[in-house]
Amino acid sequence: MSVSGTTAAAESLEVWIDQDLCTGDGICAQYAPEVFELDIDGLAYVKGEDDELRQQPGESVPVPLTLLQDVVDSVKDCPGDCIHVRRAADGVEVYGPDAE
């Protein structure tokens, strides 16, 4: 049962970037190019399965389970501490600068 619980929890995670803190390093796009991309303004944005960048402040996309470790590594190595991963169900941050 714990395996399915873990899977369900991982599938309900979403990620967003605070562009006000983004340094434009691009580390996130190197780790998970399916989720992160640098735009022409030099800042990183999340992108959905449709490959469209989510450019509204706080706009998030689901974290694909297969890319969870790459997204977590992006959070840990981001020099701007601007990547936030939260549970979709309750909005609690699980990875990022505001995680407990």
Image: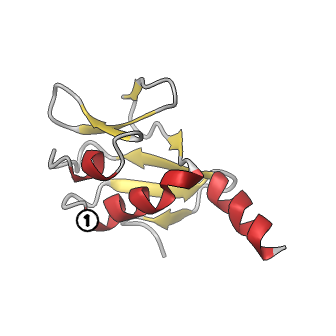
Which residue position is annotated with label 1?
Answer: 77
Q: Does residue 51 appear left or right of residue 18 in this picture?
A: right
Q: Quadrant of the N terminus?
A: bottom right
Residue at screen point 35% across, 54% down: 83
List the single residue furthest toward the right.
1
Element class at badge 1: helix
Q: Does residue 63 appear left or right of residue 28 in this picture?
A: right
- Foreground of the two, 73 or 12: 73
Asked if residue 1 is positioned above or below residue 28 in the image, the reply reads below
Residue type beneath disc 1: Asp
Q: Does residue 1 appear left or right of residue 34 in this picture?
A: right
Dot 1 surroundings within 10 Å: few (below 14), some, or many (20 or more)? few
Q: How many marks?
A: 1
Asked if residue 61 is positioned above or below residue 87 in the image, the reply reads above
Residue 76, image x and y in percent?
Answer: 32, 68
Residue at screen point 22% across, 53% down: 27
Q: Does residue 14 appear left or right of residue 27 in this picture?
A: right
Residue at screen point 36% across, 48% down: 32
The part of the image, by quadrant, that contains residue 54 is top left
Residue 37, image x and y in percent?
Answer: 29, 36
Colour theme: secondary structure
Asked if residue 55 is positioned above or below residue 19 in the image, the reply reads above
Residue 77, image x and y in percent?
Answer: 25, 65
